[in-house]
Amino acid sequence: MSLVSEEFPDEVPRRAEEITIPADVTPERVPTHIVDYSDAEQSEEQLFQEISKANVICIVYSVNNKKSIEKVTSHWIPLINDRTDKDSRVPLILVGNKSDLVEHSSMETILPIMNQYQDIETCVECSAKNLKNISELFYYAQKAVLHPTGPLYCPEEKELKPSCVKALTRIFKVSDLDNDGILNDNELNFFQRTCFNTPLAPQALEDVKNVVRRNMADGVKDNGLTLKGFLFLHTLFIQRGRHETTWTVLRRFGYDDDLELTQEYLFPLIKIPPDCTTELNHNAYLFLQSVFDKHDKVSKCFPTCPGVQTSTTPCMFVRASFRLTTYLDVQRSLEYLGYLGYSIICEQESQAAAVTVTRNKRIDLQKKQTQRSVFRCNILGAQGSGKSGFLQAFLGRNLQRQRRIREDHKSFYAINTTYVYGQEKYLLLHEVMPDVDFLSETDLSCDVVCLVYDINNPSSFEYCAKVYKQYFIDSKTPCVVIAAKSDLYDVRQHYSLSPHDFCRKHKLHPPQPFTCNTADAPSKDIYTRLTTMAMYPHYRNDTFFFFLWVWHMAQADLKNSTFWLRASLGATVFAVLGFAMYRALLKQR
């Protein structure tokens, strides 16, 4: 009542009416609903109901009444603890009222109680009569809810709790932009702007570092703040009652009250319409480039990412893996970018800004062009046809290297870069398990199909023919037949048509010979062709596309040839291409 009227009432009722303090008159800008209790007017059942709804409880005692103080531990705290779950205890504020009636403080008696019960956030002495610390009391109550001490600090050990250390360590590593283990002045200012929307003045920066220097030997190094110094500062904030500073930092970096990254932070909303795909955009690629350039081992990029399998894979492949993950499981990609601090460092609202949702494939087909950079190729074939070898060869592994890979380390997916007419693209290969009778929507949904058969197995091609006729004969998805294990003897297939005749009948390109049984890394030419077909599916059976293909491969094969040989063959290709275009125009006319 003194808080609301700002004066002491002449007649104090047994119980004050419930009131709500509006957000605009509180320091923390949150509405506060205050509920009074009187055992003279209310039952214990009513008390228990209010305890279950409370975010914070103020236990009021009289500083001039010893029995009132004793009742804090003999009655009130046990009663509250019995009615609240151990893992989600409500913070308590001890309030010593009637301080105007005594000249001494009750703190000497209260401090041991505070040390005994971790749920007690703080203690404040006040006087409702002369309004001493009344506003402060309710401010502390708000702080106990919004900025609790419990998850951050252990008063018995006088140190940060392990979960808090872990969270602040991640924040330090994200803020350490040059990865030298020190927050220099620029990084400290970036951190300050990120969390508090204002930079620190040069003198203020020096003052902060001087405080750390005076208290610990290795808190400042090369005029920058070390991790130990960073953790010490937050310990100091908490010890001095400035929990809100540490909580502001934690919440800005995505943490909740349990010091876990929130679902909203890790998985921001992103809408993906049907027939659209997800890709990392250029800004996200540059971000990953800067992150991985700072680390010689991938494991250092994920020091605080739970569930991330670390390795010593070169960062180039990891960047490709991010594109794979973004395409197949965009939520997982958003999660990883969240752990790496993308939205913080790039000053974006969320990681969703890192992802481009491509337009519908049907529009690409209508316009006969695409802005996509990742294309999916599904590999189908009978068991033992060479699908796995074809997939592994895309990563530069010949047969000898493939034999050294453990079975549990093999994947049904691979992604790598290809170059189509000078443009860098990514081809994603997916090995589909053989089952003619049932292929799922995922098995059929792709940009180009590889039908792989073993030229040395007379029964191998039949599966490719059945799959094509059952699922792709009327499809707009381009298909390529791969004659795998081409280093072996080519036997006659038991199917009614030879692979060449089958391709000719269905207007497919002739079977493409392929082997991964090579001394060096297998050729990547076929993967470039597949990417090209995925990019230009509307040309898949046209003479025009065929000669674009010939021109591209001629350029690839003649990299090391003499100038005149390259020039003469180039002129020949262009002449044939021109004739093909002339015939196409005549046909249209």
Image: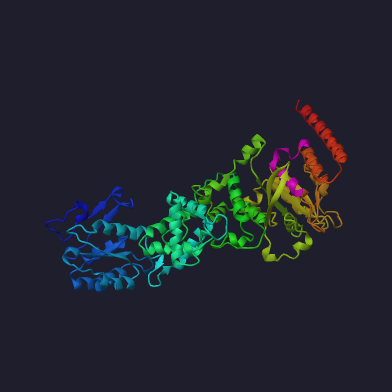
Which quadrant is home to the C terminus?
Answer: top right
Instruction: Give percent across and percent down for residue 114.
Output: 31, 70
* Magenta region includes residue 210: no
Magenta-highlighted residues: 526-544
Instruction: Give percent across and percent down for residue 184.
Output: 52, 56
584 is higher (above) or lower (below) than 81: above
Q: Is residue 32 left or right of residue 223?
A: left
Q: Is residue 494 visible?
A: yes
529 is higher (above) or lower (below) than 516: above
Closer-to-camera residue (512/195): 195
Q: Is residue 1 visible?
A: no
* Magenta region includes residue 541: yes
Q: Is residue 505 left or right of residue 175?
A: right
Q: What residue is drawn where x is 80% and y is 42%? A: 555
421 is higher (above) or lower (below) than 35: above
Q: Is residue 562 left or right of residue 420?
A: right
Colouring chosen for the image of the structure: rainbow
Q: What residue is drawn where x is 76% and y is 60%? A: 384
Count how many numbered circles sit on residues in the image. 0
Residue extending farthest left: 10
Instruction: Give percent across and percent down for residue 563.
Output: 85, 40
Instruction: Give percent across and percent down for residue 139.
Output: 30, 57
Overall secondary structure of the magenta section: helix
Closer-to-camera residue (443/486): 486
Q: Is residue 467 left or right of residue 8?
A: right
Closer-to-camera residue (325/510): 325
580 is higher (above) or lower (below) than 62: above
Which quadrant is home to the N terminus?
Answer: bottom left
